[in-house]
Amino acid sequence: MRNVITTELTKLRRQIYIKLLQKIISGKYNEIPKISKEIIKEGNILQGQNVYKMKITIDETIKIILGTNYSKTKDLELYEIVPEMEAILKGESPLMNKSGKVINIIREICDGCPLPSYHITNMCRNCSAKYCINSCPRNAIVTTDKRPEIDLEKCVGCGLCAKNCPYGAIIKIQRPCVFACAVGATCSDENGFVLIDDEKCVQCGECAVACPFGAIVESSSISQVAIRLGKEPMVAIFAPASVSQFGPKVSLGQFKRALKEVGFADALEVAIGADMVAKEEAEYIEKNLDELGFITTSCCPAFKRMIETRFPEVVEHISPSLSPMNMLAKKIKEDHPNAKVVFIGPCIAKKYEVTLEPYTDYALTYEEIASMFAVKGIEPSSVEEEELDNATPYGRFFAISGGVAEAVRNFVNKEFETVVCSGLKECIHILKKAKKGEVKGLIEGMSCEGGCISGTRVMVNPRIAMSNLRKLFKIEEGILNQ
Amino acid sequence: MKVKVCVGTMCHLMGASEILTTIQEIAENNPDIEIVSVTCPGYCHIGKKPPIIEIDGQVYENVSVESVHHILKGADK
């Protein structure tokens, strides 16, 4: 599961959200280009980074989180965008990002770090035995007068040299974005800078979390939401993973209340939608599992897109149900066609999913909505607690790996197998088997290891959040206890 | 020693939950430390940098998981 560390970069990104929201809410659009100066002046220089790099990081991040199409705005200066601000906030500017692509690369910030490779460090003693040379199956290690060297042209990356070195002097260098990407979508351009293969990318956002330079940034709709809040009817729907995301003093009921105070007409739990999905998928399984052999869940957008891009021959095995988010949003839209529905969760891929169906209008992460709380002076821990919606504990456990399968099982009146895969790597592994007919039953797939509670943009360590979720709600657990 | 950890929105955004976990870990071996998580006492509104903790009335700003060890040691004397 993910280990959440609030790094200097995390703090910088959140400061940018706060500053940008301040300018937008107060209508001072012409001050947006000054945000980088303000942040730098306040002494928040990333340790060891120069001011130029810092300014670029802030300015380019602002363009991306304004929701613009970065391939169009990357060559513009921020002040050139200011005259377009009204249109950008309304979502009508030609500069807006209309594609479902939410992952953007700031090329100036990319460090062009080395691609994954093995490297003999100066801890090497140049011993007589030469375990490295003798264990290499490709003769990729050559002797020099100082110490052996790896010929990267020949090296296949098996790692045997590192394993056999008695000094542990051989290390594997990683490129964080490449390591994080389970679908092999991050690659290099001719100059060694990161490039994303849009055909392969599933918009999971792991590369954005992994990049230690902040060169990969996800789009945002926070500005468009901020400008409409309190003026247009908007309904917030929050993910089952919301438990504990705002610290130990904020209950789910208080979070619900805080959303209303910040300007939403209503705030509902996506867990209600999850209950609807579980029932629908249960019916679908009863009718179709025998014929199809295996059926996969459809609630995780990155998982679903992974199947569509990588295993197109099995797309008919994906459950036709909407995701819990869209299920609930559809119901809200039926009752209130003019309302805008805003999803709040831990997920970057949901930002992509909202562009696919007409039900949910915007998707925000917890840090985005928390920045809004901060700017509007709302302290969720001080507001009154509201009663929660009548979702079942099964719907609420959609946040944890195994929870979806458990909920569906609860509604199905026949025996069937379930396979839980957590993390995209495991999902790919299981689908390869399923394609060959080796896996039967319901395949639950979640792109993040551990489930949404360990999502790409969670604010609290998943272990803490998960233990709180289990304390708050109880279900008879079969799969979840394993 | 009474350690107040602010877990208000601003401090939370700047990593207060990790600070709290770290202090809880330190307190496991030190029965003198009493931890109270508090909601925003307003220090960030008067220019202090979050995350903020308060030890026996003394306010510490811009606390990190690293610096909190030193702060607690210093305050213990």
Image (tube, grey):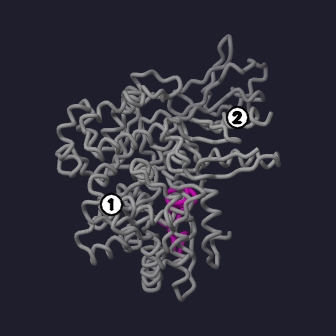
Q: Nearer the viewer, mark 1 or mark 2?
A: 2
Q: Residue at x 66, y 37 (%)?
A: B58
Residue most extreme to the bottom: A413
Question: Callout 1: helix, strand or loop?
Answer: loop
Which amino acid type is marked by label 2? Ile
**Image position, residue A237 (x, y; %):** 40, 66
Quadrant where the image shows the C terminus of chain A? bottom right
Which residue lies under the disc numbered 1?
Answer: A354
Q: Using the image, determine if residue A228 lies above or below residue A479.
A: above
CA neighbours of label 1 inside 10 A, class few (<14), some (14 to 19), many (20+): many
Residue most extreme to the top: A145
- Residue A49, visible in the rendered structure: yes
**Image position, residue A26 (x, y; %):** 29, 44
Question: Callout 2: helix, strand or loop?
Answer: helix
Please identify the quarter of the rendering in which residue A269 is found.
bottom left
Mark 1 in CB contact with mark 2 (< 8 angstroms) = no
Kindly identify which chain the residue marked by label 2 belongs to: B
Q: Residue at x 53, y 64 (%)?
A: A433
Distance between the alpha carbons at the discs numbered 1 and 2:
45 Å
**Image position, residue A359 (x, y; %):** 29, 68
Q: Using the image, determine if residue A124 lies above or below residue B23.
A: above
Magenta region, residue range: A430-454
Question: Which label is found at residue B71?
Answer: 2
**Image position, residue A148 (x, y; %):** 66, 19
Q: Residue at x 52, y 85 (%)?
A: A412
Which amino acid type is marked by label 1? Val
State yes or no: residue A102 in magenta: no
Q: Residue at x 27, y 66 (%)?
A: A233
